[in-house]
Amino acid sequence: MTMLAVAPVLTTFRADRGDAVPERPNRHAVAHTLDRRQYSEPNALQAVLLAVSGGDPEPTANGHSPQACTVVARHSGGAST
């Protein structure tokens, strides 16, 4: 299951060969281009989740993953300007 999320990030991208910048996160596109399609909120969230994921560790005796991570969306509640 982990590779399903990681595979698009690792696909080959070559700006020097005229490859189109992918919509999904891609490490090569981030390193070699400056494009809004790469620097988006959904891509940033996916990159953070991949960075903090520890794969599929064995659960502890109580059944919980030792590297569990909870992401909580927060809203300031204030008016935006």
Image (spheres, rainbow, N blue to C red):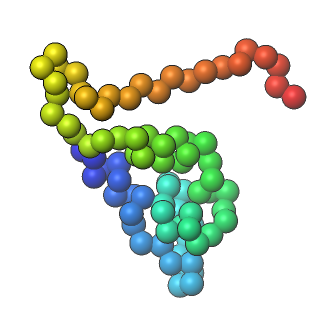
Q: Residue at x 79, y 17 (%)?
A: 78
Residue at the outermost right position: 81
Quarter of the figure that contains the N terminus: top left
x, y (%) of residue 19? 53, 76
Is 36 placed left or right of 21 in the picture? right
Q: Nearer the viewer, residue 31 or 17?
A: 31
Residue at the outermost bottom position: 17
x, y (%) of residue 70? 42, 25
Is 28 placed left or right of 56 in the picture? right
Q: Nearer the viewer, residue 20 or 35?
A: 35
Q: Is residue 37 above or below residue 76?
A: below
Q: Residue at x 55, y 46 (%)?
A: 44
x, y (%) of residue 53? 35, 41
x, y (%) of residue 73? 56, 24
Q: Is residue 29 above or below residue 42?
A: below
Quarter of the figure that contains the C terminus: top right
Is 80 placed left or right of 5 in the picture? right
**How many numbered marks appear?**
0
Q: Residue at x 22, y 21 (%)?
A: 64
- Residue 32 image-quadrant placement: bottom right
Q: Residue at x 40, y 58 (%)?
A: 8
From where the camera sits, is residue 46 visible? no
Q: Is residue 21 above or below residue 81?
A: below
From where the camera sits, is residue 20 visible? yes
